[in-house]
Image (spheres, rainbow, N blue to C red):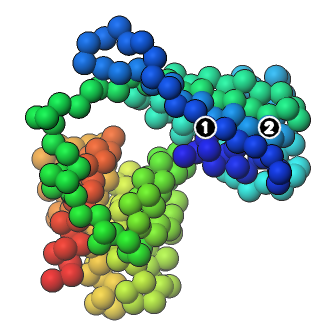
Amino acid sequence: MNIISNAIKYTPAGGKIDVRVEELPCDEEGFALYRSSVRDNGIGMSKEFLPYIFDSFTRERNTTMGKVAGTGLGLAIVKKLTDAMGGTVEVDSAPDKGTTFTVTFKHRIATEEMPTIAESPAKDISSFKGKRILLAEDNELNAEIAMTVLEDTGFMVEHAEDGDVCVEKLKNSEPGYYDLILMDIQMPRMDGYTATKQIRALSDSEKADIPIIAMTANAFEEDKKNAFDAGMTGFVAKPIDITALMETLSSVLHTSNK
């Protein structure tokens, strides 16, 4: 999605974008090898810039001068996710000629024993549509990934880059504006525990009672206890398991709506 979005963003009106998916021979039993390519004839990139294309917050001068909106995080996310899934991503580009991205992954072949989406405990994501999450996360890359995943399931997401910003955003919002808070624990100015305690002490009971889900790389029982002692509603461990996150969100929202 990030690669196709970039192709659209950097290809002027009247240009062309081709998306191709093909299966390749696979040497591992039980897996299939697929190669996906996105080719455009847009503005392209210089060979000097290509070695830095997957660096965070990096954009070539011709895109910033052209006032094309962007954070410089999209391709860093692509590379991070591709590496995590054991795949490869390659790029070929030239100024004013266009760009081709090629992503290759091995996918496990499904069997009848594997659970389908319809059987998944987190199957009903229709209730997520239109719900607004306040995401408190100081790491820009983690925030970008989380926002992409959440928005793809129907949530509206707003980002607070630290615990104190999260508290102020909630304080200044209309009652009921946010449905839930995803709260990172370790943040530089105000940690998630402190932010949660301040929220629970708010005079507006609707804001004070908002569901708060902790997100932390420290997933020991003591950390869970600390989260619940601070007044948090739920707990998910980092790195985030998408299925576990969806199940937690569904459970917390269902309980809060009763």
Identify the residue at horizontal 63%, vertical 35% (top origin).
38
x, y percent for residue 62: 87, 42
Q: Is residue 228 left or right of residue 70?
A: left
Using the rendered view, name the quadrant where residue 126 is placed: bottom left
What's the CA distance linking mark 1 and mark 2?
12 Å
Q: Is residue 34 visible?
A: yes
Left or right of 227: which side holds 51? right
**Amino acid beneath label 1:** Val
Tell me the crowding category of disc 1: few under 14, some 14 to 19, or many 20 or more residues within 10 angstroms, Cα based: few
Question: What SS does tag 2 mark?
Answer: loop
Q: Secondary structure at mark 1?
A: strand
Q: Position of residue 191 (x, y in %)?
A: 38, 58
Q: Could you tell me the amino acid type at mark 2?
A: Asn
Rendered view: 136 above or below 8 = below
The numbered mark, 1 or 2, whose residue comes first in the sequence reads: 1
User: Dividing the picture into quarters, in which one does residue 132 lie?
Assistant: bottom left
Above or below: residue 49 compared with residue 121:
above
Pointer 2 local density, CA inside 10 Å: few below 14, some 14–19, many at least 20: many
Residue 88 drawn above or below residue 96? above
Q: Is residue 224 visible?
A: no
Lateral position of residue 138 relative to residue 72, left or right:
left
Instruction: Please count the marks in the image.
Output: 2
Per the image, the residue denoted by label 1 is 19
| Closer-to-camera residue (156/188) | 156
Residue 42 screen position, x and y as percent = 81, 41
- Between 155 and 200, the residue placed more toward the observer is 155
- Name the one closer to the observer, 100 or 173: 100
Residue shown at 28%/44% (left/top)?
241
Task: Kindly identify which residue carries mark 2.
Answer: 41
Residue at point 54%, 36% (across, down): 78
